[in-house]
Image: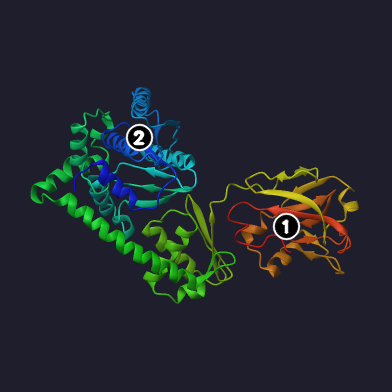
Amino acid sequence: MSLSAETFHRNLSRHPPASRYWIAYSGGLDSQVLLHLSAKLKASHPGLQFAAVHVHHGLQAAADEWAETCEATSRMLGIPFRLLRIKAVAKPGESPEEAARNARYEALRGLLSEGEALLTAQHRDDQAETLLLQLLRGAGIAGLAAMPEHAAFGPGFLLRPLLSFSRAQLRGYAEEHGLAWAEDPSNRDLSYDRNYIRHVVLPLLEKRWPAVKDTLARTAKHCAEAQTQLNALAADLLKTVIRPQRGTLFLDRLRACSEPDRRLILREWLRSRGFRRLSTRMVDRVLNEALNAKPDRNPTIRWKEGEIRRYRGELFLMPAAPPFHPDKIIPWDGVATLRLPDGNGDLSAALEKRAGISPAAWRTGIITVRYRQGGESLRLPGRHRSRDIKKLFQETGIPPWIRERTPLIYIGDELAAVAGWWVSAAFAGQPNDCNIMIRWHAPQGFSGAWPLVKD
């Protein structure tokens, strides 16, 4: 199949139409061809909306010049242009290149609106290189599926319409149409694994197996089809072990599954909650510690993106919690919404006709927010004796990591309420009157895991 505006259009037409196609335009050979094809298609199909976006990393000395050239070329071809400047800071254990790639995709996700698509210029040679990289890293079927032609991306989706064409075909198209492109000097640096595969490994393989790139790309396609089937199976398996109300897994049901099914369920659980794939080593650790710990233990398995906790026969999944300082005393005027420190959400107070703190008691002293230090107690309305907060939490089944972050509302030096749960009898109004209702809008991963406000 030859590369032309017609074949390019056919590849795009295999997918749902987009309200606008953003062209990821670096100025290199591949994206130059993609831009030119898009301009030709726009001329023959004026209803299609295209725009080019260039991400300025600032990693190369010629970065400013590249950006200017990309803008001039886009304007010349009648394609609207957008420049995104990013500053990538590598996290611990992350290479500068990986940090730049992650920052680039984060910026591009933020650019898209619902129904829009990002077009990238990866081709068949890139697919072969990706499969080899994943194979050498010991990836499973999902990794060997390499790059899909269509994928969800931010509020829109990502398309790789040139994936069925080779690098030679793209170069031939560029030369035929007299296109000029920039050469990134880092593409020749053999210290990068992908460059080593591209310039050393694949040429050697091609001497023995001339069609190796086509073969590897076909293998990636087979793996992608197999992964699609596995995804469907994993989704069905997850339904058998999940508690839908709060997205937790029942341990006894998970134990009843075979080991391969447990792995599928765990990976699907993570994927469905927006987490990236865990390494095989980490999956093994989660399953081993979560399933084999003694009944009186509540293990926590953490990684840089999130954490999995076990409590009362369930597994909880949540983002990695920021550092927390429970010794803080936070003043509150009791009127405006209070943003709590340490990423602990916020508190709001509203007058509602329901059980709560009486408006008169709410104004009797200085209001502060504190956290458990140990030994706190509360007398509930209608009760004769105070109860330890710890006991109330245990009886209600509130997990320890929520207990330690639950705000305690003090009026003066007395505990008036446990946000979202209980009010002290000394401050409670009549249930049928209008009272102050305090709500804790908990941080992500907490509110979805537990009903923090009782209705």
Residue located at (18% from left, 33% from top): 176
> What amino acid is at disc 1?
Gly
- Percent of width and height locating residue 443: 62, 51
The relative height of residue 405 versus residue 37 in the rendered view (above or below) is below
Q: The residue tagged with tag 1: helix, strand or loop?
A: loop
Real-space Cα separation, disc 2 to disc 1, in angstroms: 58 Å
- Percent of width and height locating residue 308: 51, 60
Residue located at (33% from left, 29% from top): 77
Identity of the residue furthest to the left in this view: 208
The relative height of residue 355 versus residue 108 in the rendered view (above or below) is below
Nearer-N-terminus badge (2/1): 2
Quadrant where the C terminus sits is: bottom right
* Figure coloring: rainbow
Mark 1 highlights which residue? 374
Mark 2 highlights which residue? 25
Q: Which mark is residue 98?
A: none
